Image: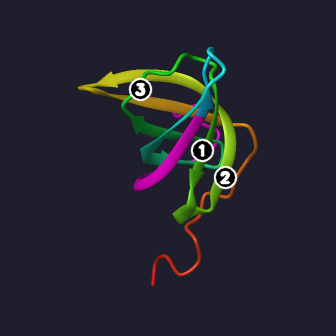
Amino acid sequence: MKTEKRRSQRIDLNEEGTLSWQAEDGMTYWERVKVMNLSDQGAIVELTQKLPGRQLVHLLVPSWKVDSSGTVRHVKQKGLKYLVGLELSATIKAAPARGRWT
């Protein structure tokens, strides 16, 4: 049996968000992403560009009141897209925006 190593539980999602980052060329890039899961300290997002490990990023997920910076921890190619694991720099309260479940 596999032992869970995460510090907090992940919530499976299928939400839209925005990821932005500053590349080595000094330009700031952003992309609409699909947030696959979210926890108090991290997230998995799907995007079309491959980001380098340790890249500083900013994640915005309005439907879950997430507005946080973070770091790319791992990248896995899935077809023509990439699943990017993020470690958020500040602990968030992973909960939907008010009225979301009514």
**Mark 2 highlights which residue?**
67
Magenta highlight range: 1-20
Furthest residue toward left: 79
- Indicate whether residue 5 is drawn in magenta: yes
Secondary element at image label 3: loop
Q: CA distance from mark 3 to mark 2?
A: 21 Å
For marks 2 and 1, the one nearer the N-term is: 1
Which residue sits at x=66%, y=42%? 41
Residue 26 in picture, x, y percent from top left = 66, 20
Q: CA distance from mark 2 to mark 1?
A: 6 Å
Q: CA distance from mark 1 to mark 3?
A: 15 Å
Can see residue 1?
Answer: no
Q: Which mark is residue 59?
A: 1
Quadrant where the N terminus sits is top left
Local crowd at mark 2 within 10 Å, few (<14), some, or many (≥20)? some
Local crowd at mark 1 within 10 Å, few (<14), some, or many (≥20)? many
For marks 3 and 2, the one nearer the N-term is: 3
**Mark 3 highlights which residue?**
49
